[in-house]
Amino acid sequence: MALPQLHPFRPRLLDAVRGYSGTQLRADIAAGLTVGVVALPLAMAFAIASGVKPEQGIVTAIVAGFLISALGGSQVQIGGPAGAFIVIVYGIVQRYGLTNLLIATALSGVLLFAMGLLRLGALVRYIPVTIIIGFTNGIAVLIGLSQLKDLFGLKIAKLPADFFTQIGVLLEHASTFNPYALAIGLACLALVVVWPKSYTMPLDNIGWRHRAYRLAAHVPGTIVVLVLATLATAVLHLPVETIGSKFGGIPQSLPDLQLPPFSWESAKQLVFPTLTLAMLGAIESLLCARVADNLIDAPRHDPNQELMAQGVANMVAPAFGGIPATGTIARTVTNVRSGATSPVAGMVHSATLLVVVLAAAPLAANVPLAALAGILLFVSWNMGEWREFARLRHFSVPYRTIMLGTFFLTVVFDLTVAVEVGLMLACVFFIYRMSTLFRVEPPAAADAPAGVPAGVEIRELFGALFFGAVGKLEALPAQLPEGTRTLVLDLHRLISMDTSGLEALEQLRRVLAKRGITLRLAAVNEQPRSLMQRAGFAAHVGEAAFSGTLAEALSASRAAGS
């Protein structure tokens, strides 16, 4: 058996720098600086919400973000810690500990690289959109719920990962509510919502208000609220929890390279977390890359190269204490809107974060956690596709069942269970729909051939004859009238057949033979004929059973005296 052809490792950067101009470099530097500023508060917020230290989110954005841009298959995608990972990472940390999270992240990187190497990038597109919408909305709900602790300033040492337990703990500690934290969080949320986000309008021939709006939109709203909330907390000495009070601040350097301790015993326990991280990373990165393709006029991304880059990034980042990374839609869109032309912009974004850490890390000590909670509530709201719930009434019962089932299972259990059950339901409903499309019918009156010999019955097969539809063929003998001597199956509309369908056809031939009825096949298409020949069915029944057209089959039946 031939080995599968491996995908060559060729980053998009190699093609992007051909003919690279100074104008492109300036555009990429400007875009990278903008995205770096946007990524800073998000990296810290995602890390804290995931149950790890804020510097681990920044390190992930620096190390993994650089590698994803430098080695990836997309022109403008930005990689780093993502909101979709928050719930997964938090659950792994609570259940297995931080060290095992780093091991699971590195193992997921190995899987991602192998998926790309074996050209499995296209398989991610086969996951139904109903499942993706369901678990995305479920994750958004869980992110929002996890931020209520810091938004209300509740004194909870450690929030559990389970949905219902979280609600119980939040209600139990409701009496510790901090009004200052709530005021900061809501003010930050409101400001992020109303802050200008589009600066594409031209500067000439517009009023000063539009000009101010356009200039303000160049400053990310997340940075504005972070700076204002930090200044308010420091100047007014507000009694709220900050990064400094909870984590002791952010180190003014990158952590030393240190491989997490690895053992096969721990690896065997991390099979499901590893699969979950790899699956979610693949889905998120390739969805993000497809969004980026629609925003730029450039060659489409290479999904296999992108998976290999994601794999390398997730193998290397844990050595610096980093958490799982993938493509991030919000930062990628910001990158495109800022004028990025190549992966260089993503590399500049990582360098920008590194400079910020080396130069200004101590300033983060006064960042209130309530401000980050407000930012994450905005992220979770934008992450969910809430309109899909209102549109459910326009879709079929299978669509509703898969989407709502995946949503509720994500919220109540976890992503792995949700996707597994969602895929199982999707397969069951798909099999059902395909089975309903297969039909065994007499020719329509308008299409019925003239001069059909007595004792000859004609049946047309429509669709695909597979294991889910064989029952309709098995019921055919009982439907034939008395005196039938020949059954002609017109297969010109049978597009495919599997081995179960072939077995049903052989069983039909045996049943008919016992009743003295001859089976003839007319207009057999290429795929069914190939299967019949490879399985020996054609040789067993003989060439006399096959006819080129329905007219030829009727002529052969007439000549045989049927």
Image: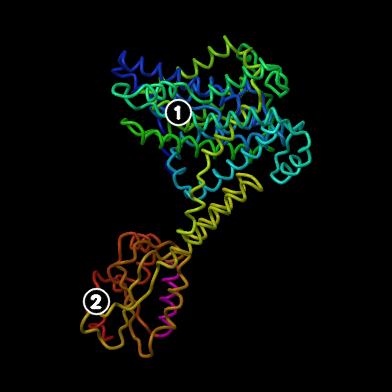
Determine which of the numbered discs, if any, sits on residue 108 in the image.
Answer: none
Left or right of 220, for residue 214: left
Magenta part mainly helix, strand or loop? helix
Could you tell me which secondary element the residue under label 2 belongs to? loop
Label 1–label 2 contact, CB within 8 A = no
Residue 529 in the image, given as x and y percentages of width and height: 33, 63
Residue 84 drawn above or below residue 36: below
Q: Is residue 449 left or right of residue 1?
A: left
Which region shows up in magenta?
A: 502-515
Residue 513 in magenta?
Answer: yes
The crowd level at tag 1 (other Cα within 10 Å; few <14, some 14-19, many 20+) is some
Tell me the quarter of the image containing the N terminus. Answer: top left
Nearer to the camera, 126 or 400: 400
- What number is the disc on residue 447? 2
| Foreground label between 1 and 2 | 1
Location of residue 89 with respect to 532 vertically, above or below? above
Q: Is residue 328 visible?
A: yes
The amino acid type, in three-letter code, at marker 1 is: Pro
Give the residue type that dot 2 points to: Asp
Residue occupying image coordinates x 43% and y 68%: 436
Q: Is residue 132 visible?
A: no
